[in-house]
Amino acid sequence: MQAITYEHIKTCRQSGARLGIVHTPHGSFETPIFMPVGTLATVKTMSPEDLKSMNAQIILSNTYHLWLRPGEDIVEEAGGLHKFMNWDRPILTDSGGFQVFSLSDLRKITEEGVHFRNHLSGEKLFLTPERSMEIQNALGPDIMMAFDECPPYPAEHAYMKASVERTSRWAERCLEAHSRAEDQGLFGIIQGGEYEDLRRQSAKDLVSLDFPGYAIGGLSVGEPKDVMNKVLEHTAPLLPDNKPRYLMGVGSADSLIDGAIRGIDMFDCVLPTRIARNGTIMTSEGRLVVRNASYARDFSPLDKNCSCHVCQNHSRAYIRHLIKCNETLGLRLCSYHNLYFLLELMEKVRQAIRDDRLLDFREEFFEAYGFNKPNAKNF
Amino acid sequence: MQAITYEHIKTCRQSGARLGIVHTPHGSFETPIFMPVGTLATVKTMSPEDLKSMNAQIILSNTYHLWLRPGEDIVEEAGGLHKFMNWDRPILTDSGGFQVFSLSDLRKITEEGVHFRNHLSGEKLFLTPERSMEIQNALGPDIMMAFDECPPYPAEHAYMKASVERTSRWAERCLEAHSRAEDQGLFGIIQGGEYEDLRRQSAKDLVSLDFPGYAIGGLSVGEPKDVMNKVLEHTAPLLPDNKPRYLMGVGSADSLIDGAIRGIDMFDCVLPTRIARNGTIMTSEGRLVVRNASYARDFSPLDKNCSCHVCQNHSRAYIRHLIKCNETLGLRLCSYHNLYFLLELMEKVRQAIRDDRLLDFREEFFEAYGFNKPNAKNF
């Protein structure tokens, strides 16, 4: 019995997007889905009850950050990440690979693993596929990620090829080291940058290892949007139909819809909470910077079309006031709204798949959001 | 019809403490009561729903701070402070007098009012009894406070006498300027420092003006605790039995109990939320600094005798982790617990009055809390 299974419900006849259910030891979630990111065992400014009230079905947490603080031993002693943070629904942890590459400049990659420095203390650290599995087995999420090399964008074909091959060898070592396959599912990560042949090679290598799910990594790292879409178009069909597909680090509304259309089931990103803490709001009519002076006397909700608790109870003027005064409630209200907005968007995407009209929904949403305007921001 | 009325329920036969109900245009609250402080139209880190879930019955907000940000005109345009911050229960605002004295060093007191500098911008400002009333009438709280002079501690008798007399003249001007007596009750503030004759004079002056409630100001400003208790003992009996009595700026557990015993009905203080943001917790067994390393692997609740949501769901180890990582959820959980602790303490005080055993309750509480130890901190 696999810890993680994918149940396919239907395929949108208009777009080809997949509607499904992923079953995990801590319950099931519907796909396509957006996963809020709780870097340090907390989705910034949100309580577990807040997340449940917005119907978050699975959250993500970061192996690298929890390894450093509080340390995976403390989380394990607490009874695992679910108990430590009081979240009884599914959790996914990444492998630490992305943070090693994005937070540390002094890294050295060897066949054995990656030498780098703790971004807080400067202390020397060494992360290997085996160590990443050991940490994730201690943290105890439902879904773990294989430890991969995250190459920069752009990267030469030769560099990328060596990297993809190393990531495949590391994937085997991860499977070998993973000690809790009965209650934790380990996903493989397809790399290869913008190179179709390398994505193909990576997919072939990893699919042959029979992971219970697959991620597409190395996207949303600065490449143009059409590059991302092209990579998804030739990579997703290489993955097994009966396993979930996860596009890592993507959380803009347009990319969630475009990813779903290309067969992606799972997404995560810090975007909604990060921009919220700067007073930037996602609305059905596009982006709104609520800290701007123009909202000082605007007593309407953040988004007049939103049914979230914040939009039902608080005004732009009040939220602007809180943010201008550095009151944490302001960050909390903005974070809540943005997460609700993306979770509700994915519910609408799922409904559009049920109704075989996701391409129509895309047009309507993009029109209202302003993505179709010539000067639209990639948001 | 007065906007604010006091209904006396009973007097504790053991201690003399009063049990009562204060009726306001936004509902009633039981006394003795602790009022959480929402300086800038938000009790720091708390949502209105959080406050309701801990059974906060009335909150306080600060005229000076709201005057500066967002400005009383914006709050008025929102429909008043209740609507602006989405709090439909009673609100009390102070007069701005205390902040003028505590936040600004460049102040000059004249008979007309106080010249001082904005603590944020350095801009010159002028606050008078009339202006304080105008701002509070615009903010629209249920209970307003008269604009008084807050003298330093200690102060010479001659200085204090002049100050008390000016505060009495200002109190008359406040009553004259107050334009919404039908739905806002204005409380007078008794000053006089540690001088019994001046407290008597101040009480006589203000009681003759027939305010719907009275505060005792100028305490908890650095004087020893027995000085505060003595002032309460000779001042409270000078106040009318049929009106609420409010001890300003007091929020330590021991002082709440000792104030109630001396006939005080209402208390406020930033203490519980301020120390919470530094990771300091009030528990039934005394103070606990949860950020300390000794709690890193302590999976028990903040207070094993507490039934608050935080203590039911989160461990010391998790909360310590959040605070060490500067995660705002940590501050929020600590703030919630400390406020709950004081609100529940006051419910226990009210029950002890009902049962005519507040002195016994005081002994039990002080013993468990550690106040009876020789090295007890004044907390």
Image (cartoon, coloured by chain):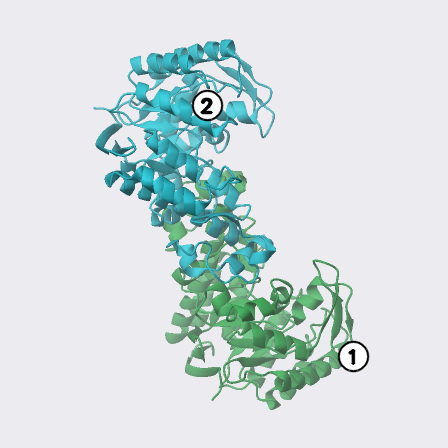
Chain colours: A green, B cyan
Instruction: Examine the image and state in which quarter residue B239 appears.
Output: top left
Up the image or down, B370 lies above or below A134; here it is: above
Identify the chain of the residue marked 1, using the numbered disc in the image: A
- Work out whether residue A211 can be spotted: yes
Report which residue position mark 1 lands on.
A158
Q: Amino acid at mark 2?
A: Gly
Quick one: quadrant of the N terminus of chain B? top left
Res A283 visible:
no
Spatial CA span between label 1 and label 2? 76 Å
Q: x%, y% of residue B302?
A: 47, 54
Check the image and name the residue furthest to the bottom. Answer: A208
CB atoms at circles 1 and 2 under 8 Å apart? Answer: no
Q: Give the labeled residue for mark 2.
A: B218
Residue B72, x across and y down, in percent: 43, 29
Q: Residues within 10 Å of mark 1 (few under 14, many from 20)?
A: few
Q: Secondary structure at mark 2?
A: loop
Query: Which chain letter goes with mark 2?
Result: B
Q: Secondary structure at mark 1?
A: helix
Q: Name the residue located 67 percent from the left edge and 76 percent from the top edge.
A: A131
